[in-house]
Image (cartoon, rainbow, N blue to C red):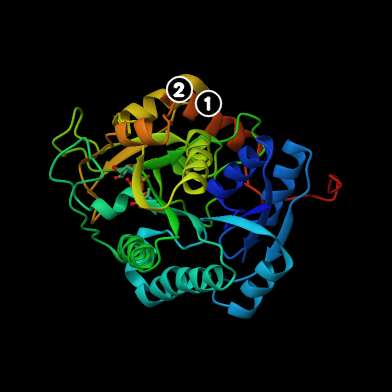
Amino acid sequence: MAILVTGGAGYIGSHTCVELLNHGYDIIVLDNFSNSHPESLQRVERLTGQSIKTYQVDLLDKKSVERVFAENKIEAVIHFAGLKAVGESVTVPLHYYQNNITGTVILCEVMQHFGIKNLVFSSSATVYGDPKQVPITEEMKLGATNPYGRTKQMIEEILRDVAFSDPSWSIVLLRYFNPIGAHVSGLIGENPNGIPNNLMPYVSQVAVGKRPYLQVFGNDYPTIDGTGVRDFIHVVDLAMGHLRALEKVQSGKGIDAYNLGAGKGYSVLEVIETFEKVSGIKIPFRIVDRRPGDISICYADPMKARNKLNWKAVRDLETMCRDTWSWQRNNPNGYNIITDEHTPVQ
Ligand code: WQD
């Protein structure tokens, strides 16, 4: 029996595939490669010494999704596939609703048709919107403030309705805080298309010389040094959280949500300072205006995941920065391998 990983070629998906394979699971990857690169899966195969059965399929193509389930014995699904750029979602909301929500509905319809009702869903702390207090617990009121976040919140509601309609479903909603870092090998990592929206990939692109300096979006927040504070979590810790969630869906029924965060907040300047310390590289930056929609401080209370998933983040900020730098230094152009006439393609 296999685990279907939708979006398995993506940043968190590829890191989760490594841990699934290393822990003895059979996996199948479904990805449309619209926001990921097949090279990431080749690297996962290299890292684990195992081959991955991959389907280049878009979740909106129901016939193809049905074929994946018809051709394989799937026991559970980890659903990463989705668009996730907050800024982009504001400009093309219908694209986000169609891709993220309709794609998930189609996936669940096909799962239901094949009698497969174990699902781990990639949600996000963005469903909390601007929290009234920190640390954030799962019981706090949801209130996403952008179309991307609203797709995650709506999907959570849809999945709650599905679980209520049919108690044989077993669903875990994982609310990620700020995933950063990379596999210690430096072979896989975050590979954003175009100009990075997120802090850490931007910092690492400055370090590798792809960007001249980092813009720090505001230093007038009510925080330790005026810059934004976030709960950064190592992507491998996050991947391990999915294995715990898989065990949970396979051992029970119903639906529940869990925060996957380290439970500690670091400021933008603290991240820059830590990255400089572990890389030995100065990161030039300029303080600019706040980014619209940003919140000042956000970090998790991770106790529910610790107590009910037997999971906690163990990698510290220095490790997150060191592993990020190892990936970026070895892959200055991410998975877009640029070869000149002298370097044969491997
Ligand atoms: C972190 C801090 C910025 C870039 C987003 C999504 C969320 C989730 C994680 C998907 C903030 C500051 C950033 C830069 C900066 N994604 N910053 N200069 O906004 O907390 O969360 O990514 O689920 O949904 O909202 O992460 O990395 O963009 O920003 O100063 O060039 O870094 O202002 O304080 P964010 P981020």
Question: Residue 291 placed where, x, y %?
Answer: 26, 52
Expressed as whole percent of the image width and height from the top left, the position of residue 306 reads: 37, 30
Relative to 175, 343 lies left or right: right
State the SS at label 2: helix
Q: Are marks 2 and 1 in contact (CB under 8 Å)?
A: yes
Position of 285 compared to 57: left or right?
left
Label 1 Cα neighbours within 10 Å, binned few <14 / some 14-19 / many ≥20: many
Decide if residue 194 is on the left or right side of residue 274.
right
Q: Is mark 1 within 8 Å of ligand 1?
A: no
The quadrant in which the C terminus is found is top right
The label shown at residue 282 is none
Q: Position of residue 107 (x, y in %)?
A: 52, 69
Res 93 → quadrant: bottom left
Q: Which residue is found at the position 49% from the left and 44% from the top?
A: 251
Residue 213 at least partly seen? no
Q: Could you tell me residue 279's position as x and y percent?
A: 52, 24
The amino acid sitting under disc 2 is: Glu
SS assignment at label 1: helix
* Mark 2 Cα shell of 10 Å, populated few (<14), some (14-19), many (≥20): some
Residue type at mark 1: give it. Arg
Calculate the distance from the C-alpha at mark 2 to the C-alpha at mark 1. Answer: 6 Å
Q: Is residue 338 above or below residue 327?
A: below
Q: Nearer the viewer, residue 260 or 38?
A: 260
Residue 322 numbered tag:
1
Q: Which residue is mark 2?
A: 318
* Residue located at (70% from left, 43% from top): 44
Q: Nearer the viewer, residue 283 or 203?
A: 203
> Splitting the image into 4 quarters, where does residue 45 fall?
top right
